[in-house]
């Protein structure tokens, strides 16, 4: 049996030479995802057979895999190494350093843990306050360590504020959704009321109630 080959041009991964953990994935079946993939892959595959071609897991960011290492439904290939297509890479990640590229690929939770771990190993200078001016800048004689820590603290504080903002925005959205739901319920109730009033009118007309009698009965029902 011939080996499975990754369809990405210049990617040398096959089922024979693949490193452990690398998997091969079929193209998606829904039209929406298919179009997304086509847009990305049309310049990156010399041959792309929708039924037969496979893309290796090296081209998918970690966030696109579930806990069972299965590719999620909304996954799209986004990683193409420098050797595979330098031009397209430059277009995607212009002037990105190695660190920036790796940062892009790391899931948020891993990133947070990573920072926490690194920070737990570093000791904050005990006299940091002494090196900081009222404008929240480092004094001229402050050691590098103090400058670094001040920056870390500023960044950390900014993150906390941003997270607060995210939480607040989420709450606002929830409130909006709730009030939308409520107004929808009110409208439904009103529609039901109108329906039952219409029904009552119909019954009254069949019983030959006069217009005045109908209005009187309807008003008494409505004011209840
Ligand atoms: Zn590949």
Image: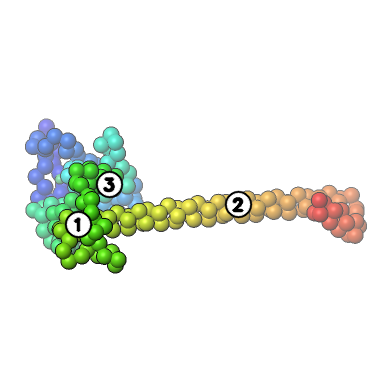
Residue pointed to by mark 1? 146
Judged from this view, the residue extending furthest toward the top is 1
Residue at position x 14%, y 38% in the image: 4
What crowding class fits label 3: few (fewer than 14 Cα within 10 Å), some (14-19), or many (20 or more)? Answer: few
Quadrant location of the N terminus in the rendered image = top left
Q: Depth check: 183 or 151 in front?
A: 151
Mark closer to the chain start, 3 or 1: 3
Mark closer to the chain start, 1 or 2: 1
Q: Depth check: 58 or 124 in front?
A: 124
Q: Quadrant of residue 156?
A: bottom left
Q: Quadrant of residue 40?
A: bottom left
Residue at position x 8%, y 53% in the image: 83
Q: Depth check: 201 or 192 in front?
A: 192
Residue at position x 90%, y 60% in the image: 212
State the image coordinates of residue 186 (x, y, percent, origin top left).
65, 53
Instruction: Please name which of the two marks, 2 or 3, marks the residue nearer to the observer.
Output: 3
Q: Secondary structure at mark 3?
A: helix
Mark closer to the chain start, 2 or 3: 3
Cβ–Cβ below 8 Å for labels 1 and 2? no
Distance between the alpha carbons at the discs numbered 1 and 2: 54 Å
Q: Is residue 25 left or right of residue 18?
A: right
Q: Is residue 191 left or right of residue 123?
A: right
Q: On residue 112, which mark appears?
A: 3
Q: Secondary structure at mark 1?
A: helix
Q: On residue 194, which mark appears?
A: none
Residue pointed to by mark 2? 182
What crowding class fits label 2: few (fewer than 14 Cα within 10 Å), some (14-19), or many (20 or more)? Answer: few
State the image coordinates of residue 102 (x, y, percent, origin top left).
18, 51
Q: Is residue 56 left or right of residue 63?
A: left
């Amino acid at each position: 049996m011939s080996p499975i080959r990754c369809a990405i041009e210049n990617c040398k991964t096959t089922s024979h030479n693949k490193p452990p953990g690398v998997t091969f994935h079929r193209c998606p079946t829904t039209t929406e995802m298919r179009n997304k993939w086509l847009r990305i892959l049309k310049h990156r595959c010399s041959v792309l057979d929708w039924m037969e071609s496979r893309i290796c897991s090296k081209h998918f960011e970690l966030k696109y895999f579930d806990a069972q290492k299965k590719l999620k439904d909304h996954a799209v290939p986004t990683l193409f190494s420098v050797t595979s297509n330098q031009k397209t890479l430059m277009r995607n990640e212009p002037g990105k350093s190695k660190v920036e590229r790796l940062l892009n690929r790391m899931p948020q939770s891993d990133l947070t843990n990573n920072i926490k771990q690194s920070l737990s190993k570093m000791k904050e200078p005990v006299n940091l306050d002494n090196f900081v001016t009222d404008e929240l800048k480092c004094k001229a004689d402050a050691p590098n360590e103090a400058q670094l820590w001040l920056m870390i603290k500023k960044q950390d504080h900014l993150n906390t504020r941003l997270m607060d903002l995210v939480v607040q925005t989420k709450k606002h959205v929830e409130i909006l959704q709730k009030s939308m739901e409520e107004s929808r319920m009110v409208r439904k109730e009103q529609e039901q009321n109108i329906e039952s009033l219409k029904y009552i009118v119909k019954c009254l007309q069949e019983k030959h109630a006069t217009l005045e009698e109908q209005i009187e009965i309807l008003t008494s029902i409505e004011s209840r």
